[in-house]
Amino acid sequence: VMALYSDAKKSLVVEETLDAIAAINTMVEAGVTQEPNVAFVNFALAPGQDMFQVTPPGHPNCRGDRIMATQVMHKLFEHGVLGRALALPTGDKVTECLNVASCGDIVDKACCQAAAICRLDPDGACVEYGAGAGAL
């Protein structure tokens, strides 16, 4: 079960509703994780970065989708469904990496893979991951 994602205003996260959405996700997680063979996938989208499509409004863009897919893969790995997963940061580094503003400053591959606006290129360098195509 996927967490409810944050509200959007144009392409950005509405920070004023993050606490309410976190409370909803906590209640849903508490309920669904009591069921057998059910996992709850929680994730955060980076405030201050383009995370949502403008058309149609309110849906995550490529960056938001990548964050969600990364967390799904990580949860499936934790539950033994996948044998391998991406290296991801832990602890305080999770939020720090998610919200990084400059990909070129990242030297840790795990941090790059968790950053909202970054990806690893074929040579292993951390480079910007675009927000996707704009409205037509």
Image (cartoon, rainbow, N blue to C red):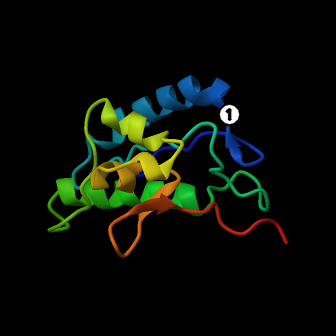
What is the quadrant of the C terminus in the image? bottom right
Which residue corresponds to the image point at 34% horizontal and 47% vertical from the top-left?
A: 40
Left or right side of 128 for 112: left
Which residue corresponds to the image point at 28% horizontal and 44% vertical from the top-left?
A: 89
Residue at disc 1, secondary structure: loop
Left or right side of 87 for 66: right
Total numbered labels placed on residues in the image: 1
Q: Amino acid at mark 1?
A: Val
Q: Residue 109 appears at what percent x and percent y?
A: 29, 55
The answer to whether residue 12 is above or below residue 66 is above
Which quarter of the figure has residue 124? bottom left
Which residue corresponds to the image point at 57% horizontal and 25% vertical from the top-left?
A: 20
**Crowd rating for badge 1 (residues with CA inside 10 Å; few <14, some 14–19, many 20+):** some
Which quarter of the figure has residue 18? top right
Name the residue at the right extreme: 136
Q: Residue 63 appears at what percent x and percent y?
A: 55, 58
Q: Does any portion of residue 10 appear in the rendered image?
A: yes
For label 1, the residue is 14
The answer to whether residue 107 is above or below residue 131 is above
- Name the foreground residue: 131 vs 27: 131
- Name the foreground residue: 84 vs 80: 84
Left or right side of 90 for 71: right
Which residue corresponds to the image point at 62% horizontal and 55% vertical from the top-left?
A: 60
- Name the foreground residue: 102 vs 116: 102
Left or right side of 65 for 134: right
- Name the foreground residue: 38 vs 110: 110
Q: Does any portion of residue 38 appear in the rendered image?
A: no
Q: Residue 29 appears at what percent x and percent y?
A: 37, 37
The answer to whether residue 14 is above or below residue 64 is above
Q: Residue 71 appears at what percent x and percent y?
A: 36, 53
